[in-house]
Amino acid sequence: MIVPQWNLVCGDDYLVELSSTMYMVGTTCGTIFLTPLSDRWGRKTVLLACLWVQAVVGICLAWMPSIIPFVVLQFFIGITNMTIALCAYVLIVETFAMDTRELPALSLQFFWAGGIMVLSLFAYLVREWRYLQLLVSLPQVLTIAYFWLLPESLTWLLVTGKVSRAKELIVRVLRVNLLPPIDDLDQTLAAFKDSAARQMSFEVVADKETHSTDDLVKPAAVDTLVNSLAYFGISFGMPSLNGDRFLNFFISGAVEVPAYIICIICNRRVGRRLPICVFLIVCAVANIAFIFTPQQTDDGRDLSALKTTLVMIGKFGITGSYSALYLYGSEIFPTSIRNHAVGLCSFFENIGSIAAPQIVYASKSLSNLPMTLFAVMTLVGAVDVLFLPETHKMALPTTIQDVENWAQRRRGARSGGDSKTAVSTGTDRINSSFNPDGIANDQ
């Protein structure tokens, strides 16, 4: 819509892709500079600050007089957007017990798919991009209510020693859910505070010596890069497909819904690694089939619908993998560095998202380059994810020492030990005390 507004054709057509690239550069800066702040200041604080800044910038974006300030503001939209996504995801993962966290964490993705479908409808009905920008930005003002409605992460409060705030939150949850008070709450919190302090003190020394988190970050970073490159590459390539662009964009959001449903079922019954691996293979196979499918048959029959279908199957596969990877990445890192580590992986994720629009733009000269690259990368990711530990029904690690213990138990399991033993955290025990379903969190 901005193309006719500022006559971005011929030699200026690259500015359209530059706008998308600057947004992705912003998301990268967000993961580097803003996301780690939530480990220090809290998930809720950083989340709300970014929501409100993005609302203001989004409204200002609708009044930009030329492409240059438009591109600059896209950077600030990006820098807040990724931080919002990561903080919200970590907040959800840390709020729910380990036996129930899959459903709320993965259900969050339905709103993303719904947003794609609703946005395609809005774009079809509202052809003036300035009005469309206001339509998607003004509702964010309503998030002011989150200041009172959204609780801070109980896990973060406990691990950072904010016991009084943690107690207030627990009492509030018990009251709202009409549950009886916990008799030994003060003693439990005090014991956990002492335990957390000792473990955090150990961590200052052990952090420089342990390689457990390095072993997790490296393959996780590769997989986030792969998923991001393929997901955004396929998404940015949607306008180039034959057919109605609004309908294609709507369908690209609709195919995500069954991917999320299957992902939830598999994550609850099978685990994390295998579903991610299979979803990536589905994406790779669809991409390879797209490459070898001609635009038309020898007798002149048009195959553009088939090629579009293959792209949608690829979108289905990468969506399932991407959604599971977010939950997976939030589970394998300890609370004390979770947002920092997730942010580090998201840095590589954003390298992929920055490269994606440029790779799609290169398809004007090399038509099969994007799908070839996406196919190869997703196959690499399918193998790489198998080097990560399974986190299904495992308690969230609180400190780096928990990760060390986790790795030792995994090695013991390979030697014939108990493979079902999970890292037992104080937050899981406290959560189980007021879980309305009475779900025990310790294994």
Image (cartoon, rainbow, N blue to C red):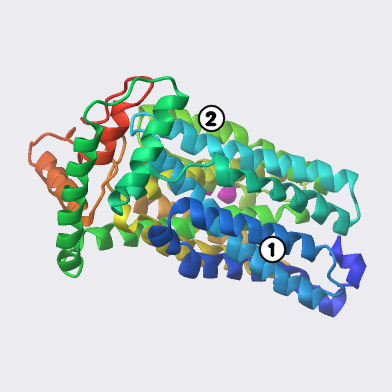
Does residue 5 appear to the left or right of 431 in the view shown? right
Kindly identify which residue carries mark 2.
261
As rendered, which of 394 and 377 lies closer to the eye? 394
Which of label 2 and label 1 is nearer to you? 2
Looking at the image, which residue is at 66% across and 71% down?
22
Q: Quadrant of residue 338?
A: bottom left
**Which amino acid type is shown beneath numbered disc 2?**
Ile
Q: Earlier in the sequence, mark 2 or mark 1?
A: 2
Classify 80 as above or below 322.
below
Kindly identify which residue carries mark 1.
367
Predominant SS of the magenta segment: helix
As rendered, which of 145 and 406 lies closer to the eye? 145
Q: Quadrant of residue 270?
A: top left
**Which amino acid type is shown beneath numbered disc 1?**
Ser
The image shows residue 360 at horizontal and vertical percentages of 67, 64
The image shows residue 90 at horizontal and vertical percentages of 43, 48
Q: Quadrant of the C terminus?
A: top left
- The answer to whether residue 375 of the structure is visible from this angle is no
Residue 48: which numbered mark, if any? none
Does residue 32 appear to the left or right of 110 in the view shown? left
Which type of secondary structure does the marked residue at label 2 adopt?
Answer: helix
- The answer to whether residue 298 of the structure is visible from this angle is yes
Looking at the image, which residue is at 17% across and 42% down?
191
Circle 2 Cα neighbour tier, 10 Å, few/some/many (<14 / 14–19 / ≥20): some
Question: Can you name the residue that lies furthest to the bottom here?
Answer: 11
Q: CA distance from mark 2 to mark 1?
A: 33 Å
**Start and end of the magenta stretch?**
284-288
Classify 148 as above or below 363.
above
As rendered, which of 300 and 279 lies closer to the eye? 279
Looking at the image, which residue is at 49% across and 65% down?
34
